[in-house]
Amino acid sequence: MTVGKAPASARKNSVRKQGGKNVKDNAILWDLEARFWTSGADSARTMTSENAVMILPYPPGILRGNLIWKHVKQNAVWRTVEMKDRSETSHGVVAVLAYLAIAEKPGSPIYKALCASTYLLDDGGWLRLSHQQTPTA
């Protein structure tokens, strides 16, 4: 399987290097996931595969490539996110995080969604391959 990578220079600065998946990797993955919500498009892009897919409530729906970043830049960064009911699973170099997100940003009501993100341990760093959100109400 060929996976597009974030630019190497960006990945070196944003994704912590690890060997095999372990308990420390779980903490790193949850940190990456929280930063995806709160650190803005440029930060999120450095930790996301070039051919990633995001599935968001319609509209925007299913996004790939540059459409992801256009959407993220047009929407204000979430001020806070709480991730409850966390669950994780992994197999080899693939890890999946699932959780209930409770997020807020200025001028918007509290957002609650069931979320799942898939990560790949590639060249010593974790890259997000996919992210999906299902609003709870």
Image (cartoon, rainbow, N blue to C red):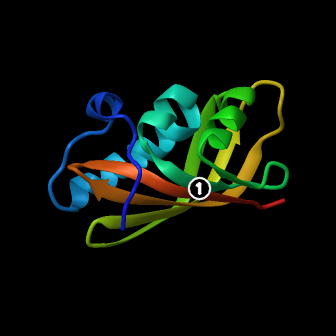
**Residue placed under numbered mark 1 in the picture:** 53
Q: Give residue 130's position: percent from left, percent from top.
A: 53, 58
Q: Nearer the viewer, residue 98 or 84?
A: 98
Residue 115 location, quadrant:
bottom right
Which residue sits at x=50%, y=36%? 44
Q: Give residue 41's position: percent from left, percent from top.
A: 57, 30
Q: Give residue 62's position: percent from left, percent from top.
A: 72, 57
The amino acid type found where label 1 is placed reads Val
Which residue sits at x=51%, y=27%? 42
The reply to whether residue 76 is in sight is: no
Q: Nearer the viewer, residue 62 or 114?
A: 62
Q: In terms of secondary structure, where does tag 1 sit?
A: strand
Query: In the rendered image of this protein, does residue 72 appear above or below residue 113?
Result: above
Count all numbered tags in the image, as a single digit.
Answer: 1
The reply to whether residue 106 is in sight is: yes
Residue 78 location, quadrant:
top right
Q: Is residue 123 left or right of residue 43?
A: left
Q: Give residue 104's position: percent from left, percent from top.
A: 71, 35
Which residue sits at x=40%, y=43%? 31
Query: In the rendered image of this protein, does residue 92 appear above or below residue 52?
Result: below
Q: Nearer the viewer, residue 37 or 109?
A: 37
Q: Quadrant of the C terminus?
A: bottom right
Q: Residue furthest front?
A: 2
Q: Residue furthest left?
A: 19
Q: Is residue 129 left or right of residue 126?
A: right
Q: Is residue 15 left or right of residue 133?
A: left
Q: Quadrant of the N terminus?
A: bottom left
Q: Residues within 10 Å of mark 1 (few under 14, many from 20)?
A: many
Which residue sits at x=38%, y=46%? 5
